[in-house]
Image (tube, rainbow, N blue to C red):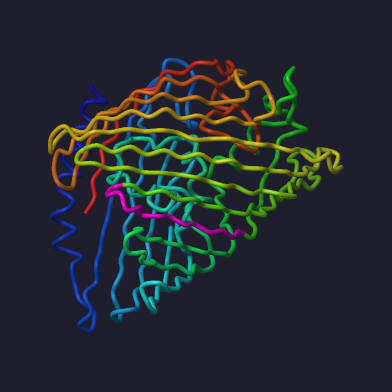
Amino acid sequence: MHSITKTSVLAALLCAVPAVMRAQFDFKVDGLPVQVHSFASQGFMYSNDNNYMTTDTSRGSFAFTDFGANVSTQITDNFRVGAQIYDRNLGKLGNWQPALDWAVADYRFKDWLGVRVGKVKTTLGLFNDTQDMEFLHTWALLPQSTYSLDQRGSMISHLGGDIYGNIELKKLGGLSYTVYGGQRPDDMNGGYVYALETSGKQGTDPNGISIVVPSTASSTRHIDSYNGPVYGADLRWNTPLKGLLAGSSYIVQDPTTTGSYVATKIPFRIWTDKDNTAAFYTEYTLGGFRFDGEYRREIMDTTTTNSSGVASAPTDKDMRSGYVAASYRLTKLIEVGTYCSRFYYNWAYLHSDPLNHVFDQAIAVRLDLRSYLDLKIEGHFMNGTMPSATVSRGFYVAPNADGLKPDTRLLVIRLGYHL
């Protein structure tokens, strides 16, 4: 009864908010129209076994909430400024700590040349720069192989600048490009820091795969910072075939993690020797049908200091990930879809080992209850847990005291509003 009441109250609030927002926040400043948009979502997750994304999903959890608001104005025909505030709570992640999601000044010289500076959304793959816009997607959870919720805060934007533009190719369609560089921001309430602070020391399984074991007093760490330079590029081609897009992204990161071992106060550090990701993607739409897919390969070499302060041998990872998805809008109210998502922690090791992968088959129904209100009901059939201390796709040691099981069945219900 409590769960039903909570959901009903939330639905009523979400239905009422848009009218309030329209009345209160549409305005002009010195004759310039100011656009305000807001969004919020409340989710419920229930799993048959493993706790997912640090939430208590094996008992059913409402700890899946996010909301944000952005404001922007067109100063001149070519110059636009805007910013977005975002907050969330996802189990032990987010922790209701509001953040400046992005804040940009954007000047467009020509169609083929523009510049953005500030805290700019990072263009990577199809959806990295739109993953905060839940209402644009069929899914309650985007494919977690490529758009993992626990890594959102450190991946969605960079502090720096972009050069971008659109190039008309006439009969060959058109190209859109983005080249960027800057600093990767800290996400001290994200999954990476949470895993390092709670999962303890690293070990290996019989295949040589890096795994983690529960923390001990001598291995528990406190993380102070996690950031570094990042640069990359994205090129996408709107082909002559109507509805077909293809593209590629490349990103180079050089983050450094600093902290200390709690018991001994000995400094802890992870530095990057190499972290390069190549992504290839496509999207096709025809009427109410949509197909999209993405493939990524990330080569990562890192060096870590142990609890004695000594640097260990560098660890090399060849991570592969990707998904294919299809959806169809049956009516104005109903959209259905499915995707198959795959993540391999190290391509050189046994692919079938549950400690080396996370596979996810999802089916979803989206109901557009109002123009501003949607409800998504989604089932996930997952295999693998891959509990790494530095790379995760939702599975953590600390929330699963009885150990992680190889299979997870997950139900996700997400109610979202946008204005």
Q: Quadrant of the N terminus?
A: top left
- 280 in the magenta segment: no
Q: From the top left corner, tell me how far across and down residue 216 is, in percent.
A: 73, 28
Q: Residue at x 62, y 25 (%)?
A: 356
Which of the two residues, 60 or 109, is positioned nearer the viewer here?
109
Q: Main secondary structure of the magenta part?
A: strand
Nearest to the observer: residue 68 or residue 138: 138
Q: Is residue 72 above or below residue 94?
A: below
User: To which quarter of the image does residue 397 belong?
Assistant: top right
Q: Which residues are magenta?
A: 230-243
Judge whether 368 appears above or below 128 on screen: above
Residue 300, x across and y down, in percent? 68, 43
Give the quadrant of the C terminus: bottom left
**Pick the front one: 118 or 399:** 118
Q: Position of residue 350 (x, y in %)?
A: 66, 21
Whole-percent x, y for residue 47 in the image: 41, 20
Establish if 282 lies above or below 129: above
Q: Quadrant of residue 59?
A: top left
Q: How many marks?
A: 0
What residue lies at 55% left-to-right and 50% top-to-bottom? 187
Residue at the far bottom in the pictured view: 30
Q: Residue at x 45, y 33 (%)?
A: 323
Nearest to the observer: residue 127 or residue 324: 324
| Residue 186 appears left or right of 7 | right
Q: Quick check: 241 above or below 2?
A: below
